[in-house]
Each structure stands twice: as structure tokens, then as C-alpha cells.
Image (spheres, rainbow, N blue to C red):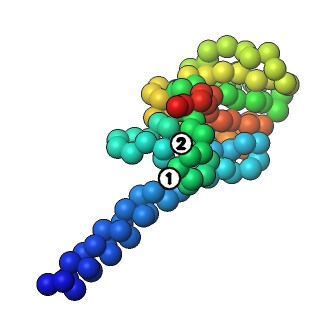
Amino acid sequence: MRQQCLIQLAVLLLISSSAFGQDAYWYDGDAQIPLWAAEMGGTPLVFRETSALGAPKQRLTGRVIVRFHAPPSPALQAKITLHYGLRFERDMEIGVVTWLYSAPNVANSLMLANRLMESGEVAAAFPDWENAR
């Protein structure tokens, strides 16, 4: 009986340790930065860039910052809206051409930013993070 309980405990610890492993990633320029969920339950919206519990937290805002190689063509603008589901908010007037978009929901903003970055169609795409307490 005791051995069975120890085996169940070991399995539970193994499962829970993977739940606290790297949960996602984002791009800072060309560097892929691992993320760990800082708040458990449901879809994570708050992350840390390290597994350390005291590390600063970042919260997804639902906005995505996109930096283009050059002014985007109407076709690329339409693709970002239709294919990625991002809605143009405003020109951020920094860098070459950097625009702010909003995602259909906060939880998808990280995934959409990563997919857009991995497409190679833009110079950079990343969530518009805010500090979380």
C-alpha cells in the first residue's frame, strides 16, 4: 500500500513539474525567449522569463507590436487582418515602420505574434507587455 502511494505521488510530481515547465515563448528581436506561466489556472495571461518564483511578471495586454522591413503593401496589411485576425490600432511612429495591432482576445495575442514573426513577413512581432505585480 505504501509503495503504491509513493508511486502515485511520484507520478503526480512528475505531471505537476511539467506543468510548471516552460509554457510558451516570445521573440525579442530574433531571440526566442522562454516563458513560464506566473499564474496557474485557465489560459495563462501572466508570464515570467525565468522559472524563478521571484522574477518579474509580464501580463499580456491583447495588443501586438509589429515592425515591418519597409512600409507594408496593401496585400500584407490585408493578410495581417484576415489571416492573423489582428486589427490595426495605430502607427507607433518609432523605428522604420512599427504598428500597433489588437488581437481578437488577450489569450491569443502571444500565439499570433509568434506566428507572424515566424512567417518571416515582418522584421519583428511581439506582445505589447505590461508589468504585472
- The residue tagged 1 is 23
Q: In front of the other: label 2 or label 1?
A: 2
Residue placed at 67% from the left, 13% from the top?
90
Q: The disc labelled 1 sits on which kind of residue?
A: Asp
Q: Residue 93 placed where, x, y %?
A: 79, 15
Q: Which mark is residue 47?
A: 2
Q: Nearer the viewer, residue 81 or 101?
A: 101
Ranked by sequence position, the earlier of labels 2 and 1 is: 1
Q: The disc labelled 2 sits on which kind of residue?
A: Phe
Q: Is residue 82 above or below residue 3?
A: above
Q: Is residue 125 above or below residue 120?
A: above
Residue placed at 64% from the left, 39% from the top?
116
Residue 110 occupies quadrant: top right
Residue placed at 76% from the left, 24% from the top?
98
For the N terminus, which image quadrant?
A: bottom left
Element marked by disc 1 = loop
Q: Residue 82 placed where, x, y %?
A: 54, 27
